[in-house]
Amino acid sequence: MTALTTYFNDIYRSVSSTMTGMRITFKQMISPTVTIQYPHVKMKMPDRVRNRLFMNFDDCIGCELCAKACPVDCIDIEVMKAPPTESLGETSTGQKKRIYVTKFDIDIAKCCYCGLCVYPCPTECLKMTDVYEFSEYDRSNLIYNFGTMSPSEVETAKIKVKQYDEEQTAKKAAAAAQAAAAKAAAAAVPPTAAPVQNAPPQSLDSTPTQQ
Amino acid sequence: MIETLEKPKTSTGKTLRTEEMIVNMGPQHPSTHGVLRLEVVLDGEIVTDVIPHLGYLHRCFEKHCEHMTSYQQVIPYVDRMDYVASMTNEMAYVVAAEKLLKIEVCDRVHYIRIIMAELQRIASHLIAIGTFGIDMGAFTPFLYYFRDREKILELFEMTCGARLLYNYMWIGGLSHDIPPQFVEKTKEFIVGFKKTLQEVNDLLNYNEIFIKRTANVGILPKDLAINYACSGPMLRGSGVNWDLRRDDPYTMYDKFEWDVIVGKGEMGTVGDVWDRNMVRQLEMWESLRIIEQAIATLPEGDVSKAIPKRIRPVPGDAYGRVEGPRGELGVYIIAEDSVTPYRIKARAPAFVNLSVITEISKGAMLADLVAIMGSIDIVLGEVDR
Amino acid sequence: MNELKLLLENPIVMSVLLAFVPIVFILVYALVTLYGEMKVAAHIQNRLAYMENGWHGTLQPFADILKLLQKEDIIPTAADKFLFSLAPYLVFVGTYASFAVLPFSSGFIGSNIDLGILYLVAASSLVVVGLLMSGWASNNKWSLFGSLRSAAQIVSYEIPGVLAILGVVMVLGTMNMQTMTQMQDGGIQNWLIFGGNFALGQKLALIPFMFILFVIYLLSSMAEVNRTPFDLPEAESELVQGYNTEYSGMKFAIFYLAEYANLFLVSAVVVILFFGGWTSPFGSFMGGPVWSAFWFIMKGMFFVFVNIWLRWTLPRLRVDQLMYVSWKVLTPFALFCIIAIGFIMVV
């Protein structure tokens, strides 16, 4: 008897649950759709959205903090310390640039969009935009060259730096010779004002601003 | 389970010679949820043995972590471990790291983390039940659930800018505070979502065909579940009342009122596929309860106050564990006197849960094997790491 | 002009021309159903489906067919090339041959034979051979699984299906499908699902049994065309794609075409058996050969829609449950109905 009851009960439940399911799907069929027609209509992006990286090269001071923060090493920077005599201009925040940034490449194909590079930037020149359509047929096109220095400019900069370095070494040698002479002449007098060597730009000392 | 049929006899009375067939299920199979390969030995339709082969998605997560330049950089990698529940991965890592660094964060951070983790649990369970429905041949509930998961992802995107891999929970705080509309939108979501939950419950979970397919299939007994160190819905589906959120309350879970869902064997035996699926379904209701309480009593505070400028812990180790959507997710960090971790080990619940598949799918049918796999809810990103 | 007339009077030419009607119908119908299925599925799932080609994507089926035509026709190296190539055509021919006896309208039927429904059942069974062939010839374990499942399934579901047909044949006393339809003419109350054209007592007694037979035939027809919840042969979550895993290009398209044609075939049989075939629901109003073709196709499409609707609602059965439903539920019920109908018709 129980087997028979289960048998009919199963049939009843199959039919009724199928009917319930069909009712639900029919209700959904006549309710409005929720999708959008993507290439024609686009979703509104929230303010904090993290998509393609954008870099404002004019504001870069070459501190390399972003490259250090990147977990996948997609930011490739080459820098050269400029001689203090050279004026490289200022960032929009009023910080003085002291370093030649000869190369600033972001390999967006490697980028994992974590946004870690954005936070340490002292001049806020790196930011993630809401652009998400940037596919390319060639992978090399995804390496974005943000650096604006042309090869000839880089060459001149290199020469300037080299000249300055030579001057510095010459000065240093002269100073050393002078010091040695002075030492030999009068042992009691200490040398004054040793030349400042490799002073890091101020920005490197300052702690990264937290958002 | 189905008892193996007797071997057919020939007219002379000898047992007919039958051969077992070995098929490779995966790595490119629609229902292996990624790139798992199962070597299945089949006797007709009946599974006699299952050997899982892993490693198709191995990305050296643990090794990568040793070569970072800071502890902070590990978080994007942790995100990619279990890519459908990134928030809980981050939570496990930051809980471990904060233990290691002895950082105290303010209540608001805890609350927001709990809201995020519970939203993530819902999002993950939605995928789990939805894809399980696909495995059973019902495609429609999957899209209903994805429709609502989309709303959760929108909440996440609004908060941290990313939809899937968030990098949101930082050691000592959060990358952003929640945006002003967040609370309101979450409330809106909860109202709409409860309807979908009920609807899919009727459409899928209580459909007679679905019940027949899942009840009394792939039964995982209590003792076996404990012996295999299963956790999460897998363990609770077998009737073990164990939830880290209650039994080892990390962050502030002890402040909230909610119930641990345990499989009761409503449609068949305790620990069958239906139970595991139902535990997930009901857990979403509990998550909603937690979120409702948390957004109602959200304290004020600065979420980024405790974030250290430079992380250089004293040598030592710490183990942080959280109850992820798939079970106990643990992160073990060994620190030496350096800015990078010496070693990071993750205890991935999906990996541990998967190990039981050989045990519970013997004697089942090929279609049941698919059901069992769906009910384990593996994410290959986490299994292989 | 005279020659043309002479040519048309030639019986061979005439039958070739007649044979073209169903194939044109199948092709047009397949395009419509392809579009319809995608749209219905999408709207059930709150999506929109095709929207790009033409108004609301109406040209998309043509694009799909063009794509399939352009695709490389791959035959696996280890496959049995002859059987592999033959199988899709055999499947299609089985279905197509059955269209010969369908009374599309009061004025058109391919072949008005007396054993129409028997011929239809026999011819559509040819599909099994094609499916088995495709699975075996693919030399793929999943395909083999799929074809074996489908053979077992179609064979077992033919029994309740045929029993249901038998019940109707007992009531109507004919196997000629045109006669069957004509017997239900005269308005909606004469359809067999509402008791047919009989005396009131008999009519009322028939209704419940006819309804059960209708459900039985609907279910077994769904199993015969391999659609959810009986789509085990091509259960994509278990068997990848079943018997047509290895097929590509036009061969795959022909499998698809055969599946859709078969879907209409069984829906048409449901309509002829229980819903009055081409007869108008309003008696002689909107009757006549053209209107009757309209009614026939509309009713058939309605059941195609029901099939699609069910497909996107229900999960899939397991093999043993599939057999259970056929042998332990549908067959006993059908037998019971037949006995009951026998009594009703005698009394």
Image (spheres, rainbow, N blue to C red):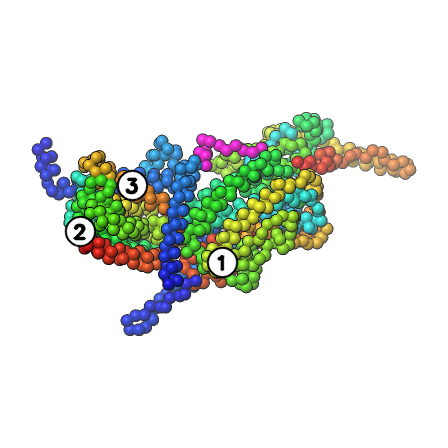
The question of residue A39 being in magenta is answered with yes
Type of amino acid at the residue the image marks with label 1: Gly
Q: Which residue lies furthest to the front in this view?
A: C201
Asked if residue C196 lies left or right of residue B17, the reply is left
Q: In the rendered structure, are the residues bearing label 2 and label 3 in contact, judged by CB atoms less than 8 Å apart?
A: no
Magenta range is A34-48
- Provide the chain ID for the residue under circle 1: B
Indicate the position of residue A74 as horizontal and vertical percent values: 58, 40
Q: Looking at the image, which is closer to me, A36 or A97?
A: A36
The question of residue A140 being in magenta is answered with no
Q: Residue C301 carries which label?
A: 3
Viewport quadrant of the N terminus of chain A: bottom left
> Disc 3 and disc 1: Cα gap in Å?
43 Å
Magenta stretch secondary structure, dominant:
loop
Q: State the image quarter where residue A204 is shown.
A: top right
Residue at 83% from the left image edge and 33% from the top image edge:
A193
Q: Residue A160 carries which label?
A: none
> Disc 2 and disc 3: Cα gap in Å?
27 Å
- Dot 1 corresponds to which residue? B265
Type of amino acid at the residue the image marks with label 3: Met
Whether labels 3 and 1 belong to a single chain: the reply is: no
Q: Which of marks 3 and 1 is in front?
A: 1
Q: In this view, does B85 lie above or below A79?
A: below
- Dot 2 corresponds to which residue? C173
